[in-house]
Image (cartoon, grey):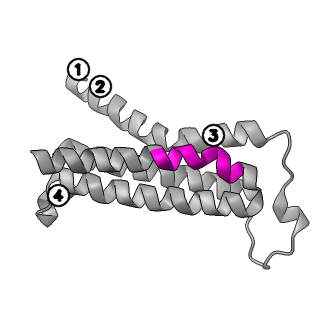
Amino acid sequence: MKPIQKIEILQALIAMLIPNVGPLLIIIAMNSVTINILDVIRTPLLTPPLWVFALLWCFFYCVIGYASNIVFKTKEIFGEWTGLSKAALAIIDLAFVDMTAMHLIYLFYKVKHLAGHLISPYIIWLCFVTLFNYAIIQMN
């Protein structure tokens, strides 16, 4: 096997692993304190066992990672397909991140005010980063 092929295989494996890191850490952290919710609540007749959910989520995250690796290797960028610049795409992306974070803070605040307040600095930082990137685009 050529060294380039080994690198490509390693890149693909890393791309498939990365989307699974977060869920795996959550599973490890929550394993000792959680119960199988499907045993507690009423579920439809066709409810698969819990291991099927875990297996399929892992599989789909691997597929998403591998598909991302293919796209990044071909150097095709969404902006090239739409005519938007990378900078404009970054601002659009940051705007969605900002909105998602604001909604998260709202939901946290509804559950417990302290939780919402604790992550409020995060949205301030995100707004700064968005405005910072916008200013860079305007200046260049």
Q: Which residue is mark 3?
A: 24
- Which stretch did the figure color magenta? 115-124
Q: Which residue is mark 2?
A: 6
> How far apart, in angstroms, are the residues tagged by discs 3 and 2?
26 Å
Can you give x and y, in whole percent of width and height, for residue 56 in the image?
59, 57
Label 2: element kind: helix
The one nearer the camera, 93 or 128, is 128
Q: Nearer the viewer, mark 1 or mark 4?
A: 4
The reply, left or right, for residue 61 in relation to residue 45 is left
Residue drawn at (74%, 55%), measured in percent from left and top?
A: 113
Res. 103 visible in picture? yes
- Tell me which amino acid carries mark 2: Lys
Image quadrant where residue 128 sits: top left
Can you give x and y, in whole percent of width and height, for residue 33 in the image?
86, 43
Q: Nearer the viewer, mark 1 or mark 3?
A: 3
Q: Is residue 6 magenta?
A: no
Could you say which disc has been placed on residue 124 in the image?
none
**Magenta stretch: dominant secondary structure:** helix
Q: Is residue 123 magenta?
A: yes
> How far apart, in angstroms, are the residues tagged by discs 2 and 4?
30 Å
Residue drawn at (40%, 50%), measured in percent from left and top?
A: 127
Label 3: element kind: helix
Label 1: element kind: helix
- Height in image: 18 above or below 6? below
